[in-house]
Structure formats: C-alpha cells, structure tokens
Image: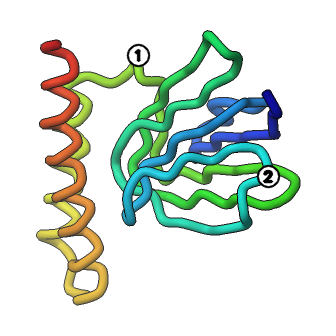
C-alpha cells in the first residue's frame, strides 16, 4: 500500500512523525480518513482519537483536543491544541479538560470565544462518554 509522511504535533512535543498508510482524524465536520494522494485540505479538529495505520497490521492512537489538520501533496500534519498518547488518557484527564474549559467559559466576556468554548465543552463531554463506553467494552 502507498504511504505518505505524517506528523502529529502538540504544543509540548512531536507525538508522531513518520510514514503511514492512513490517518483517521476527528474533524468538526465528522471523521476524515486520509490516504496517500488525498486532495489538499485544511480542517478544524474536535476532541477525539486520531488513528494512524503504520503497517497493514499495526496502528497507533492519540487523543487530540482542538487544532488543525493540513493535507497537501507532500504530507499530512496535525497541529493539535492538546495532544496525548491514548495510554496517557483516562476519565480524570478528561474531567480536568472539561473543568478547564468550564473555567475559561465562565471568565470569558467575548461572544465569539464563548461560542467556541461552549462547542469545545460539548465536544469534550461527548468524547468522555464515548471514551467511557470504549473502556467498558
């Protein structure tokens, strides 16, 4: 299968950099699957799991919360507002992210920022629910 260059970057570090077969991205418009030769695009990320397929039988998962994905002819890059290895995520981490978003929302006086924070809060709460169901399975 054809591969392409992929990078997942959080403010703290590069979480992944290498060749991949595919990437599934949680965009605000819905899940997006990127394969080699994908049309160029830029999309906004929501809270969710990025799944990268590195070989026919191997994949890796990461948690992202906000940011952008850029797909071009040379590579696909995710610039995540927050990103973690999925192993580093649990309900306590998600509860802290929700509390942080609620605190920012309570302190905001800008309507556009309030709207963005409300949407981010909804996305985090939805992801927490999905995450809990996934762990229970």
Task: Establish if 41 lies above or below 50.
Answer: below
Q: Quadrant of the N terminus?
A: top right
Q: Quadrant of the C terminus?
A: top left
Q: Residue at x 54, y 66 (%)?
A: 43
User: Is 62 left, or right, of 58 in this rendering?
Assistant: left
Under tag 1, what secondary structure? helix
Q: Residue at x 78, y 61 (%)?
A: 72
User: Is 100 left, or right, of 4 in this rendering?
Assistant: left
Q: Residue at x 13, y 36 (%)?
A: 129
Residue 71 % position (x, y): 71, 58
User: Is 18 left, or right, of 105 in this rendering?
Assistant: right
Under tag 2, what secondary structure? loop
Pointer 2 or 1: first along the chain: 2
Tell me where residue 19 sits by quadrant: top right
Task: Establish if 126 lies above or below 54.
Answer: below
Residue 89 % position (x, y): 33, 24
Task: Establish if 123 lies above or below 18.
Answer: below
Around disc 2, counting alpha carbons within 10 Å, would you say few (fewer than 14), some (14 to 19), or many (20 or more)?
some
Tell me, yes or no, whether the two marked residues, 2 and 1, touch with CB atoms within 8 Å.
no
Residue 10 % position (x, y): 58, 43
Residue 92 % position (x, y): 18, 26
The mark lying in front, picked from 2 and 1, is 2
Q: How far apart are the alpha carbons under marks 2 and 1?
A: 30 Å
User: Which residue, given by chain and number where applicable, does mark 1 sit on?
Assistant: 87
Per the rendering, the mark at residue 37 is: 2
Task: Establish if 61 lies above or below 10.
Answer: above
Q: Residue at x 50, y 52 (%)?
A: 32
Tell me where residue 53 sits by quadrant: top right
């Amino acid at each position: 299968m054809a591969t392409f260059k992929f990078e997942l970057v959080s403010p703290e570090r590069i979480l992944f950099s290498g060749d991949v077969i595919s990437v599934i991205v949680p965009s605000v418009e819905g899940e997006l699957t990127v394969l080699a030769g994908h049309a160029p695009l830029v999309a906004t990320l929501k809270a969710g799991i990025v799944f990268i397929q590195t070989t026919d039988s191997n994949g890796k998962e990461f948690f992202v919360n906000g940011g952008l994905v850029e797909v071009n002819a040379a590579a696909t890059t995710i610039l995540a507002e927050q990103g973690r290895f999925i192993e580093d995520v649990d309900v306590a981490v998600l509860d802290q992210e929700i509390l942080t978003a609620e605190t920012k929302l309570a302190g905001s006086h800008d309507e556009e920022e309030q709207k963005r924070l409300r949407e981010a809060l909804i996305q985090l709460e939805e992801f927490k629910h999905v995450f809990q169901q996934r762990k229970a399975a």
